[in-house]
Amino acid sequence: MASLFPALTDGPPDRPALRFGERSLTYGELAAAAGAAAAGLGPARRVAVWAAPTMETAVAVTAALLAGGTVVPLNPRSGGKELGHILSDSAPELVLAAAGAELPPPLDTVPRLDVDPARRDPGGLPGDRARDEDPALIVYTSGTTGPPKGAVLPRRAVSATLDALADAWQWTGDDVLVHGLPLFHVHGLVLGVLGPLRRGGSVRHLGRFTTEGVTRELSGGATMLFGVPTMYHRIAEALPAEPELAGALAGARLLVSGSAALPVHDHERIAAATGRRVIERYGMTETLMLCSSRWTPPDPRPRARADGEARPGTVGVPLPGVELRLVEEDGSPVASYDGETVGEIQVRGPNLFTEYLNRPDATAAAFTADGWFRTGDMAVRDADGSVRIVGRKATDLIKSGGYKIGAGEIENALLEHPGVREAAVTGEPDADLGERIVAWVVPADPQAPPTLDELADHVARRLAPHKRPRVVRPLDALPRNDMGKIMKRALTHD
């Protein structure tokens, strides 16, 4: 098959490829460093990578993929029990890490290869012997209902999703991406590192996300920013006091949010301050990217909205090659795309994983008889094809008074209230309604939290009376995981 990274062999060797803090590599230097690391792999074909947000991680993953290997990214913040499960399940032959990195005891029995970006292999890159269906990555899911499952992502899924995003975003080798995302997951690793390398562009990793770092990099030639909603919320909060940040964002070509829904309130605040619409995309570990708003060049002239153009609250349209449908609870297709009827998203396409490692039962349960993957995400679809996610089937679909209600739109409405800093919505059993809507709220002023009546009236005016919360529970903070997603299973009332 064609190489995942043609720029490593065909592009200008002096073109910038990676920058982490003060350290950087050109494409020529990356090719030599990856060649040296690949030579150290020997016959190993499945390798773990200690995926700290460092240059060594990017070199290690590039080297293993160029050698035709399979990468198991390890979250450095994983606890011992979870890490032990991942290692026993995936059985890596080596672990790649930065020299001097202290690895936890579960890795003591795995042979280690230190990766040094300064090491060079004059022999050049290994020949790419891998096929499209060969596994590129085994990425472990969050495991909210049991031990994490390893989603096996073939090389064709990586190339298909990155090429589809290049089409939607007009992503080229001239783009310079900045982000501060972790590198053990699809967003930061596949999109945020492998994406620029496949295009022949460059990535500047912040190490740790700060608005000052975003301002510095976007003002210094970066053209794209990737982030999660918590990052964009911090940006929205900082904009009034940081005019340099507003100017830097205004000069960016593309702002992209993913891994969770971006609240409409933050979307609008950023657009008002910068003139730039944040583009949202939608995907999962098992599917890589499925939908995205399409990038369109800024145009001050009044015009009709193009299909798939960024719109607050939607994740755009299916990417090229992706088949997407909404289905009812009985599996039948949703009758019409009217922007109101909720259904579960099911998908097919070249971007999908092949299996859950060592879990044929879970793999079979994830697919329909005719090959559609059951995402477990609930959505509505507008007449123009745009998809609006309303939440997870297990935690965000509330059946109240005969209605199917998505938690996401209520959360967006709550965030428009000036007394609400953060919000999450769940359902709990109700003898009359079936389920009642519960709002978990972090108040803007803890000394004067908004009342239930205030928030219920606020939501009812914006959405519909049956979508108003029946219970409000104040919190100091919402529980979130490493990617900034709210962990709703931790929201319980004793």
Image (cartoon, rainbow, N blue to C red):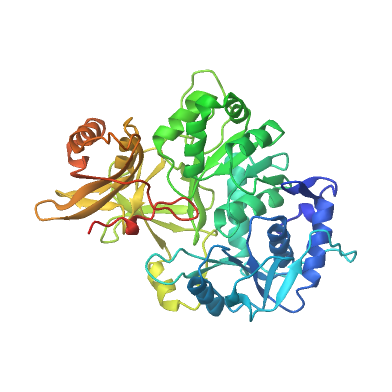
Q: Position of residue 340 (x, y in %)?
A: 28, 41
Q: Residue at x 45, y 77 (%)?
A: 360
Q: Quadrant of residue 226?
A: top right
Quadrant of the frame with the N terminus: bottom right
Q: Position of residue 98 (x, y in %)?
A: 72, 64
Tell me if residue 67 comes above or below residue 453 in the rendering: below
Kindly give the residue lying farthest to the bottom in the view shown. Answer: 109
Q: Residue at x 56, y 63 (%)?
A: 75
Kindly give the residue lying farthest to the front in the view shown. Answer: 447
Q: Residue at x 18, y 35 (%)?
A: 453
Given residues 223 and 287, the one toward you in this image is 223
Quadrant of the frame with the C terminus: bottom left
Q: Quadrant of residue 107?
A: bottom right
Kindly give the residue lying farthest to the top in the view shown. Answer: 301
Given residues 42 and 482, the one toward you in this image is 482
Q: Position of residue 203 (x, y in %)?
A: 69, 46
Given residues 324 and 94, the one toward you in this image is 94
Tell me if residue 98 comes above or below residue 479 in the rendering: below
Q: Is residue 40 left or right of residue 334?
A: right
Tell me if residue 342 comes above or below residue 49 in the rendering: above
Give the total number of marks visible in the rendering. Answer: 0
Q: Is residue 356 left or right of residue 399?
A: right
Q: Position of residue 12 (x, y in %)?
A: 84, 47
Q: Is residue 383 visible?
A: yes
Q: Is residue 343 left or right of residue 46?
A: left
Kindly give the residue lying farthest to the right in the view shown. Answer: 122
Q: Is residue 9 visible?
A: no
